[in-house]
Image: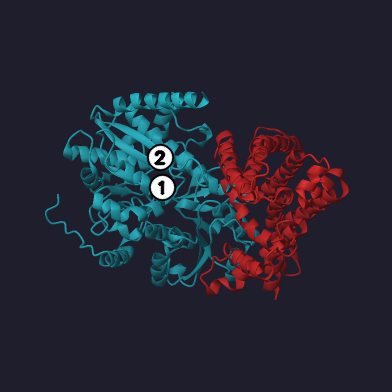
Amino acid sequence: MNLFLETFIGGLLAGTMYSLVAIGFVLIYKASGVFNFAQGSILLFSGLTFVTLLEKGVPFAGALAITIVILVVGAVVIERTVLRPLANRSPMTLFMATLGLSYVVEGTAQGLMGAQVHALDLGIEDVPVFIGDVMISQFDLVAALTAVLLAAVLALLFNRTRIGVSLRAVADDTRAALSIGINLNRIWQIVWAVAGITGLVAGMLWGARQGIQFSLSLVVLKALPVLIIGGFTSIGGAIVGGLIVGAAETLAETYIGRFVGGGITPWFPYFLAIAFLYIRPAGLFGERALERV
Amino acid sequence: MKRLTLTALLAATFAGTALVSPAAYADGKEQYVPLPTYRVGPYASSGTLWWAGEIDYLRYINDVEGGINGVKLKVEEFETEWSPDRTVEVYERVKNGKDGAPVAFFFTHGTPATYALTERSAKDKISLIDPAGGQPEATNGLVFSYVFPLLLNYYSQASVGINYIAQKEGGFDKLKGKKIVTVYHDSAYGRATQPAVTVLAKKYGFEDVQIPVADPGNEQSPQWRQVREIKPDWVFLRTWGVSTPVAIKTAARFGIPADHIIGDVWAGSEADVIPAGAAATGYQALAPYPGGPEFEIHNRLRKTILEAGKSDLKDPKFFGAVYYNIGLINAALAVEALRVGQAKFGNRPLNGEEGHWAFEHLTIDDARLKQIGFYGLLQSIKLSPADHEGGGAARIQQWDGKKWVLVTDWIQADHALLRPLIEEKSAAYAKEHNITPRTLAGEN
């Protein structure tokens, strides 16, 4: 029973790390209906920028602030050079643009800051904490708290601020939002900047665990099943989806893996996501699309 | 107008390239050395250092020694992002040489590419050079004529690891009843040692447990929870890329001491331990390519290449890093093979058949290692048509939190035990591919 509990709780906590990555996708999808393929590259870029500044002797807070400024500037540049010229094109066109953007961002990151692996110490020890006989990772606990905190801040941003209301208006009906004078370009800039900052948080936590390196951009592979399960338009859904994916893959590896040769964590979440697509195509918290035909 | 300007610019660039290339290749005294490399993409952190070492040594041979007996090496890089299909494309483009400069061998720079090219290379008679990689059974050159898993094949890696554990435990008899868990990257590379470990477990009586980690391996709690349940005496870590630092950190969280984890060749570089921080202190790894910048060759390169501003290394702090040294060693193996070939065929560029002969007769003894400045860094090796590995030893290095420290001399694999396994697997390959193994009659 202890093994089951430990595996289950460990999986839930690990899942919040996936949620952190998925939230960045949700933000952009909500505002523009686009699956942002470049989110992984942004995660890598932000983590690499932060750690490079730290290694150059910039204090933690300063490195964080400068990285955020760079991400905001980057969001404005992306909106002006990639998104604005493609406004009113199909979501597939925008998706392909983000695909190209991901290569540009990755290349820029490695070109400017090098390809070497960097250690990142956030001062959070990756040591076990015991509750009875059940072992829990202290690092995972901090990551889970961070994800919850981030979700709460974003919920406040969306629900309690003027910008948030504008964001929701654009998400609900872009044409109607434009007709009442909401500046779509500005909204996209803000959303991309916030998604970048979310990517920075995820990049820092994942980077502290595995080092800041190219493979950070591959972490997004875990976000897709999270989004399918939780829904592409809900931050709460991203959290719940992450918890489900984390717990399910860990339990599956422990209890089913040995019967099918092991190493099933990469594909099991996708198996689960396909099952959800059959039962609930919009995900647990996603908005069901109704179209007049 | 814009289009015209762009066309003019492209034409000028093309013309510039065209003016440079023929002059560079045309004198007939150049050996073409194509390098499939990966300076971008997921494995760039290893690649950039590896190519720096390889290119620095080849540049040293060209610029300081005036080439190999006057034959200059014309090096050309091709970006593959470690993708085997791109490496195959590179191979097809370069196999006939360039502008009269022939190809004597082809570095695959990756086990998947070696697998992909095995049959083509046999047809084209161009040797695939994949030190510490490739198919272990390709050690039998009588079946795999054109594949060279030089230095330390995967079976030997397993054997050296077990020999070291026996040394630490106080003898092979102490291995009986011990639990040795292998946590491996779930790929052909990761599974490659399994047949050898099975044979070794049978001989020495230890319990062999294999636990896979699927790529990329950035979350490994379930695996290390299993390892903890098993309570192993030793862990053999055969991961790659990000899965190594994550393994070391997760192992620490589950109470597995780092000094009882032995990484294999491809889990033993700075990039594997630095991200793991304090958890990696005490971690050990097989080192056919030891780390460190204090070998004689480093002194020579420091003076003639680094300080002369000719190094391919962007950050000098990585001078002597494990991957840099991998590049140096691989380049030295190629240069020494070309020397052997020139001694037989004359001081001129060699073709594929001649390069093949050269590698099959490559011998580097301690005296030669001292001459070329590689003593301690590279093991002495002696290849033959039946033995395409030639070395089969590794040192063990331990991470002290800041740098790798060599803790043993060269440890030999148990070749007598492994050879029947190599014969068995290569015979199966020969049967499957309808290959009649070579006999050495008539060869010299």
Q: Percent position (x, y) of residue B301?
A: 41, 30
Could you tell me which residue is drawn at 32 percent across and 60 percent down?
Answer: B137
The answer to whether the residue labelled 1 contacts the one labelled 2, judged by CB atoms less than 8 Å apart, is: yes
Specify few, some or many for label 1: CA neighbours under 10 Å numbering under 14, 14-19, or 20 or more: some
For the residue pair B432 and B333, the one nearer the viewer reads as B432
Q: Percent position (x, y) of residue A106?
A: 58, 41
Task: Name the amino acid type tagged 1.
Answer: Arg
Q: Which residue is mark 2?
A: B78
Rendered view: B294 above or below B41? above
Q: Secondary structure at mark 1?
A: helix
Residue B74 visible: yes
Chain seen in red: A
Could you tell me which residue is drawn at 71 percent across and 43 percent down?
Answer: A192
Task: Name the amino acid type tagged 2.
Answer: Phe
Q: Percent position (x, y) of residue B241?
A: 52, 51
Specify few, some or many for label 2: CA neighbours under 10 Å numbering under 14, 14-19, or 20 or more: some
Q: Which residue is mark 1?
A: B86
Q: Across the whole image, how many numbered discs are drawn on residues?
A: 2
* Quarter of the image that includes the C terminus of chain A: bottom right
What chain letter is assigned to the residue under label 2? B
Q: Secondary structure at mark 2?
A: strand
Q: Percent position (x, y) of residue A101?
A: 60, 42
Q: Which image quadrant for residue B354?
A: top left
Real-space CA distance between mark 1 and mark 2, rounded to the nearest whole angstrom: 9 Å
For the residue pair A191 and A149, the one nearer the viewer reads as A191
Q: State left or right for residue B298 relative to residue B122.
A: right
Rendered view: B262 above or below A198? below
Chain seen in cyan: B
Residue A13 visible: no
Rendered view: B153 above or below B47? below
